[in-house]
Image (cartoon, rainbow, N blue to C red):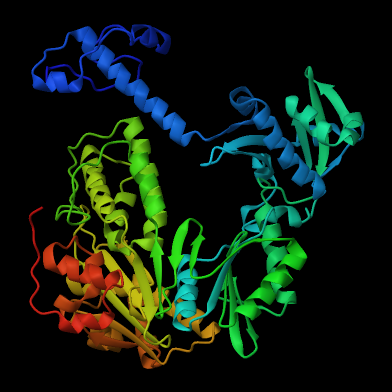
Amino acid sequence: AEHGYNLRPRSGPSFQSYKNPQPNFSQFKASKAAKLPTFQQIKAGYNPTEEEIKGLTYKFVVDHAMTEAETCMTQMSADKGFKVFGERAVEALMKEFAQLDDMDTFKPMDASTLTTDQRRMALRLINLIKEKRDKSLKGRTCVDGRPQREYINKADASSPTVSNEAFMLCLVAAAHEGRDVATADVRGAYLHAEMDDFVVVKLQGKIVDILCERNPSYKKFVVQEKGGATLYMQLLKALYGCIKSALLWYELFSGTLIKMGFKLNPYDNCVANKTIEGKQCTIAWWVDDNFMSHVQPKVLTKVIEDIEEKFGKMTVTRGDEHVFLGVKIRFPRDGTVGVKVDNYLRDAFEAFGEPLTRKAATPALKDLLTIDMSSPRLSDDRAARFRRVVGILQWACKRGRPDVDLAIAFMRSRVDFCTIQDWKKLRRLLLFLQDTIEDERIIGADDLRELFTFIDASHAVHENMRGHTGGLMSFGRGVFHSRSTKQRINTRSSTESELVGTYEYMPYNIWVQNFMEAQGYKLKSNIIYQDNQSAIKMESNGRASCSDRSRHIDIRYFFVKDYVRRNEIQIQYCPTDKMLADYFTKPLQGSVFRKFRAIIMGWEPLSALHDIGELKERVED
């Protein structure tokens, strides 16, 4: 590029500066023996020929593609797995079929007894080969359930999973009360649930021979269709891929817990509680992954044994360190819990696909929310990587890195129209995360019945002149919930922006109040902090505090007044220099950033806000 060549790819196989297409892979391998100059030689002053530039460029593209294939494409179809791994893939799939057969997943059917429509609508079985990190192989069988969408309503098949907010609150309660903790995985969870309707699946090709080798009784049901072996079977268990499988498993598992004496939390139906020997036992689950806690280890052992009696031996982890949904959890036994997501961050760095060689003091610069409309759009490849990285970070940072919530919120709003400017902002965020990858989020509680909420808003900071809302909740150490989001309407003043911000974040506060009460912790104090006196008066008094200039504000933004009147919340003034939610409304820099971040990440208690004096923001990088 420094020598004047335009190396930007276009939609076709060639580059803009070349008239002829690039050589194919076999041509490249043949020319690989030719000695190409190194990038160090070019940097030192060597002037490469056009052919050498083409060779270097193609070498980089091919090497990068092969690296991506080796690291990312670890799961493949069974047919491809047979070609790549040979008998090892066959053995892996045989083990998968053995599990399915042992659990009576299928019932072979005589094809002549099926109607034409039943055979036409039979769901296809998909068989995959997965190479694990330790290079071992695992076979996976699932159903292509997409045709079921035509006749099964989504609302009739939706299955809940524990919300992130509820899970964090379960962690905080377990840490605060010094409970013994266990995580457990139900093996082949879906296969324990029986299908509630008649579903026909079909298997075709070489896979039929493998299944029949495992169970010879299937052979007499094999027919020839379109020149290949085909086997029709009735699906008896809720195999992964069917639209209703997740719901059937949820109903079975939650029903089992209810029969054991557990009661579901009405504000999150994937959290169940039971009082055992005078103390609460809590189970929170995400599909087949379970988090359990009770102050007495022997009680927890008995609960695990009761569940295993129904669903078989589980993979159980006991002690103070766990991995739940890829998130590392640590209980230091000081009333707090530590959460780390470094593995997810490494996945994001890899998905970014470009070197991250510098350091960054903050996740974003002052211009984070500024959009350059003239910035070129990203190429299709970069745009795809942008979306993947943002998706990974959104999942990980909601669980372990609330300190980058604002930057993620902005990136999330740019996935449909990402530009070179957005790519640079994402790089900045990744540089910061790379430098702080080992940082651990700490959450704790001084009192589970005293809730502190901070709500703030920045007025007209987006390109369409809308405001930005930031909010967080804490029980005294770290934050267990935070939110940073663009406001949905335009407002005329900063006071109106504050009102809209309260309206947008208050439902989370109300939900926490209800959830905690259902868990047995009725709040005795629920304080909301804001830094706008006019907004506080309007929220406390409603229309009575409105002037002619504010009477146009929709009545829905005053619903908080009812909670104030019933003494369910108290609104208190917080000086701007101590407004912790300011962290989620604008990209802070310097000492303000460092102090607020330490409190949000739980390294310093919430009471440290009282020690904040004159802190100054730093604008430069």
Q: Which residue is drawn at 51% across and 57% down?
A: 325
Image quadrant assignment for residue 26: top left
* Count of numbered tags: 0
Q: Tell me, yes or no, if residue 547 can be seen here.
A: no
Q: In the image, is residue 441 above or below residue 78?
A: below
Q: In which quarter of the image is residue 291?
A: bottom right
* Picture residue at 43% right of the left edge, 79% below the top: 510
Left or right, 418 with reference to 421: right
Q: Residue 598: give x, y in percent of width and height.
A: 24, 70
Q: Whole-percent x and y of residue 233?
A: 82, 38
- Residue 33 percent across, percent down from the top left: 33, 8
* Residue name at image x 79 percent, y 55 percent: 196
Is residue 26 placed above or below 602 in the rendered structure? above
Where's residue 496, x and y in %? 23, 72
Residue 173 shows up from this direction: yes
> Left or right: where does residue 16 sit relative to residue 239?
left
Q: Quadrant of the N terminus?
A: top left
In the image, residue 207 sits, relative to residue 549, either above or below, namely above
Residue 567 placement: quadrant:
bottom left
Nearest the viewer among 405 and 172 is 172
Q: Residue 261 versus residue 12: which sits nearer the camera?
A: 261
Q: Which of 82 and 10 is in front in this view?
A: 82
The answer to whether residue 376 is left or right of residue 325 is: left
